[in-house]
Image: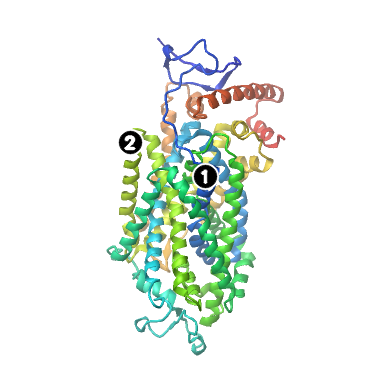
Amino acid sequence: MERKVSFTVSSGVINEAFVADDTVSCHNVDANGPGLRETQAPTTKRQQWGNDREFLLSCIAMSVGLGNVWRFPFTAYENGGGAFLIPYIIILFIVGKPFYLLEMVLGQFSSRSAVKIWDLAPAFRGVGVAQFIILLALASYYCSLMALTLFYLVVSFQGELPWSRCRPEWGEFCVDSAPGSNSALLVQNVSYSSSAELYFYKEVLREKDNIDDGIGAPDWRLTIGLFVSWLTVFIVVIRGVQSSGKAAYFLAIFPYVVLIVLLVRAVLLEGSAAGILYFIIPTWEQLLTSGVWYNAVSQCFFSLTVCFGAVVMFASHNKFNHNLYRDAMIVTTLDTFTSLLAGCTIFAILGNLSHELGNEDIGAVVRGGTGLAFISYPETIAKFDVAPQFFSVVFFVMIFVLGIGSEVGLTSAIIAIVRDQFPGVKYWHVAVATCVGEFLIGLIYVTPGGQFMVTFVDYYVTSFIAFLPAAFEMIAVAWSYGLDNFLDDIEFMLKRRLSLFWRLCWSIVTPIIIIVIFLYAIIDLKPLKYNKSFYPEVAYVIGWILFFVAVLQIPLWIMIAILRKRHLPGREMIKRATEPLKSWGPSDAEDRRKWLEFRSYRDAERRNNDRNAGHSRFRGLLRVILKR
């Protein structure tokens, strides 16, 4: 005989939000025992971090990485320096911090990866699928940056740094990056380039002017670097969090030592003050442009690695009662500090370049874009009077370490999602398939048109696309699952009630800001360019196809969830499609029993309040937001 059952707790109160839709056999129900009356399917014990420090340092290694040292400087440079800094800091506080804490809570509370967490609102499972697609794209080009880093690391062992002097084939409009350059002999009103910039584009990338005839074949030197990078990632992730947690001690701490040394050297360069002032003094009229705010949100997502599933995965390996609130505040604050540290370093270097090249416009000293960090940092290293080769080796080891820290988080998230969906597949099989597959995809980034492809994928499949899944993620948690339910879960897990700031951001402020900025960006949309060059028409078509493949996952899975309830009346069908599955909740049986008791008590209390105050959903949400 089959019948529907509900999760009934020992207090005798039925939690109606957790009535199971699925029919189960009466033989699976314990009618007499206390606590849960439905037996739970056995689950595989999830790996946990060795200690609390490993989790914190792993989050730092992932979130405080290339996004700060590589991406933040060129994004700030392309958006006017100080004109970008103010929106970025504002966005970090009202978008970055709320998202980081929300994803940590979802992962730790459920011990699930970025797709499985949507048992809390099955209709929104497409959000997790879309983020998985973004994650695949992001992980694919991260290692290409590490391949460039390894190239610089190897050539740093030469007697003289190869980018410190101009070469005859680069033409006469080149200025040595090494000390004692001929900057005093420069002709006025002529555009010059530093040897570090020309070395990057002409020797390292061997870059094409456009990709109208294709991107070219992979460069064998960079291909070797790409392979070594993925091999290193595989070695770190092969044993799961047990190995990546131990590596985090070095991955998180070492980069700060090198960054501080570089900053000290950069600020001592002539003209550096002008560059730093350009970075911190805003151009107020640019604050009214949508592009600056759009790029601030994109950089926030990229820098903190939120809305990609990696934060959820890391937190899912925590103990249930771990103090993640403290860790979220530490990581997000440190992320801001690191971005400012890297920004001051880069713009101090650009100020010096402006002085040496005789170009007063700091915004036009070098080409912007993804290669800025591979020009500015080597430029400073070439000016070291003592042992520049040593500092070059140390710096590029640091960049490689930062890249490994970030890539390990992204790759581990991919593996976790696949393993959660297919638990029967061995972990190392998934790890091998992920690393090999991403290596093969990454070959497009080590071609002469590779930086065209990095910019293309970054725009269409990571930055631009991330807005919609992010908005739906927060809407699903605050409005579908219910802000009151989410706050109850946090209170049960962390034994604390969060402040008005978090409640306002999660329910209203953050999703509205993301949607408004995205709509303004759509209105102001222009064809993507790299180095002032347009892409072939077919590239734009492919870009929009990739965009819609990811975005359409959201309405597709909403329709699937609704159709699965098609035996119900119309409104009931939609309502039940958004309710949590019976599997949602803590994975540990004892934690789950206590949680259901806690939630049942809170639900009964809430029903009494609703009867006294009316049944308006909006008024109920306001009461939750303003409740002390």
Please say whether residue 474 is visible from this viewpoint.
Answer: no
Counting from the top left corner in percent of width and height, residue 451 is at 38, 63
Q: Nearer the viewer, residue 355 or 211?
A: 355
* On screen, residue 258 above or below 565: below
Left or right? Give the position of 217 relative to 157: left
At x 48% / y 38%, what residue is drawn? 48
Q: Characterize the local packing of mark 2: few (<14), some (14-19) or many (20 or more) Cα atoms within 10 angstroms.
A: few
At x 43% / y 50%, what residue is drawn? 408
Q: Nearer the viewer, residue 440 or 120?
A: 440
* On screen, residue 183 above or below 422: below
Quadrant assignment for the C terminus: top right
Q: Which residue is mark 2?
A: 425
Instruction: State the separation of the CA atoms marked 1 and 2.
Output: 25 Å
Give the structural element (helix, strand or loop) at label 1. Answer: helix
Q: Residue furthest bottom?
A: 185
Please say whether residue 352 is visible from this viewpoint.
Answer: yes
Hey, what amino acid is under mark 1? Phe
Hey, what amino acid is under mark 2? Val
Q: Which residue is mark 1?
A: 55
User: In which image quadrant can residue 240 be found?
Assistant: top left
